[in-house]
Image (spheres, grey):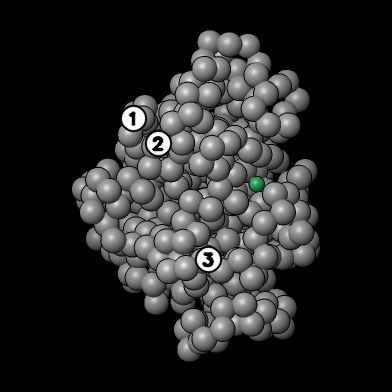
């Protein structure tokens, strides 16, 4: 069956305008939306029109008083909610549409209209916690979408994979004691926001369902592909989610000004393919990819296109990635040891 791929896009996302030289700029989406006009992709995807997120959908993740605080910035000039996070007059509206765009995507994926969606939205979300803005993020788009999929569509399990350069502290916290939402993250460490050690594995009944793979700078396609094929994908196959959501940060791109990783556009394609294959195994390919960080505009354009082509099933890299992976094998072996040390028996026999 031909894969139907949706893209969430809307000009309002460009109206969130943090301070003038902020890396999380409207230009990030301008280059992605320009890319969507390129001949290979232009006619290939279905446009998903976002809606504004309802308050009850936000409240599954965020405190009422915090939603009120963000709402109070509407129409006001530049307001700082955190040292890194500012709002402009239309930021609240854009943030509602970013979360709501992910909900619309979930609706279309779960109705079977579309198999996978790339939500090209901003502001990003994975640092936003229950009661505070953080790290360029206002509302936690993927956390809100996961809870919505469970509450409104009756899904029992959701997996969130976060390949952004930074650890998604807000997402982790939202599901830390919850065995029904598995959060798996690769991230530069130690680094902003400080969380994401191997030992952070979840708590109570959620123990084992938070999977962190912290990384020193300098990792590239070989290590990332190995981690995704040997750790993330088998964990997902054992967990068997009903929906896979990806926090897709493009700040692991080799030229990103905030990051120290070395992933190429081909590497992004490979990660997407590994996750898409995993989703095909466990949940009929139901996959939502949501934009998080990424501050090199060329990287966003090139790697964003590579991800989209993979979602469309237009393979951008060859099927044999074993040669790429072999170059990082010993480093991934060492990470797997650390992973088992932190998780005890939980994933023995699954991750090898
Ligand atoms: Zn990031």
Provide residue 212's location: percent of width, then percent of height: 60, 66
Q: Residue at x 67, y 56 (%)?
A: 195
Foreground: disc 1 or disc 3: 3
- What residue lies at 77% left-to-right and 64% top-to-bottom? 216
Say whether residue 301 is left or right of residue 319: right
Res 224 label: none
Say which of 295 and 162 sits in front: 162
Q: Position of residue 38 (x, y in %)?
A: 50, 37
- Distance of label 2 from label 1 (alpha carbons): 7 Å
Q: Which mark is residue 58?
A: 2
Count neighbours of disc 2 (C-alpha within 10 A) and say few if under 14, some if 14 to 19, many if 20 or more.
many
Q: Which residue is mark 1?
A: 54
Q: Which residue is at 66% across, 16% downward?
A: 78
Could you say which disc has been placed on residue 202 in the image?
3
Contact (CB < 8 A) between labels 2 and 1? yes
Quarter of the figure with the N terminus:
bottom left
Q: Is residue 187 rendered to the left or right of residue 274?
A: right
Give the class, few, some or many, for how many residues have Cα within 10 Å of label 3's Cα (few <14, many ≥20).
Answer: many
Expressed as whole percent of the image width and height from the top left, the position of residue 110 reads: 25, 50
Q: As drawn, which residue projects farthest toward the bottom?
A: 349
Q: Earlier in the sequence, mark 3 or mark 2?
A: 2
Give the residue drawn at x 56%, y 41%: 128
Q: CA distance from mark 3 to mark 2?
A: 23 Å
Q: Secondary structure at mark 1?
A: loop
Q: Which comes before the other along the chain, label 1 or label 3?
A: 1
Q: Is the residue 73 above or below the residue 41 in the image?
A: above
**Quarter location, residue 191:** bottom right
Mark 2, secondary structure of its residue: helix
SS at circle 3: loop
Q: Give whichever of 312, 165 is nearer the camera.
A: 165
Residue 274 can be seen, yes or no: no
């Amino acid at each position: 069956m031909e894969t139907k791929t949706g893209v969430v896009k809307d000009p309002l996302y460009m109206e969130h305008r943090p301070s003038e030289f902020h890396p999380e700029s409207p230009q990030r989406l301008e280059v992605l939306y320009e890319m969507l006009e390129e001949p290979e992709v232009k006619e290939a995807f279905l446009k998903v029109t976002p809606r504004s997120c309802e308050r009850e959908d936000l409240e599954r993740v965020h405190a009422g008083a915090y939603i009120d605080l963000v709402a109070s910035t509407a129409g006001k000039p530049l307001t700082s909610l955190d040292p890194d996070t500012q709002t402009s007059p239309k930021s609240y509206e854009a943030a509602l549409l970013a979360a709501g765009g992910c909900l619309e995507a979930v609706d279309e994926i779960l109705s079977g209209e579309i198999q996978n969606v790339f939500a090209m939205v901003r502001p990003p979300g994975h640092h936003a916690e229950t009661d505070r803005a953080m790290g360029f993020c206002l509302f936690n788009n993927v956390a809100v979408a996961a809870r919505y999929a469970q509450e409104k569509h009756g899904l029992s399990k959701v997996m969130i994979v976060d390949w952004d350069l930074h650890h998604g502290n807000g997402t982790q916290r939202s599901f830390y004691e919850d065995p029904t939402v598995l959060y798996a993250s690769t991230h530069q460490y130690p680094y902003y926001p400080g969380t994401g050690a191997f030992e952070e594995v979840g708590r109570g009944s959620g123990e084992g369902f938070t999977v962190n793979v912290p990384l020193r700078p300098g990792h590239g396609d070989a290590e990332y592909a190995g981690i995704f094929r040997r750790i993330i994908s088998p964990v997902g196959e054992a967990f068997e989610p009903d929906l896979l959501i990806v926090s897709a940060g493009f700040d692991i791109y080799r030229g990103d000004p905030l990051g120290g990783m070395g992933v190429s556009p081909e590497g992004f394609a490979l990660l997407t393919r590994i996750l898409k294959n995993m989703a095909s195994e466990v949940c009929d390919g139901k996959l939502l990819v949501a934009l998080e960080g990424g501050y090199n505009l060329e990287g966003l354009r090139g790697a964003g296109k590579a991800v989209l082509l993979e979602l469309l099933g237009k393979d951008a890299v060859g099927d044999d990635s074993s040669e790429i992976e072999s170059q990082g094998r010993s480093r991934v072996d060492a990470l797997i040891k650390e992973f088992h040390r932190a998780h005890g028996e939980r994933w023995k026999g699954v991750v090898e």
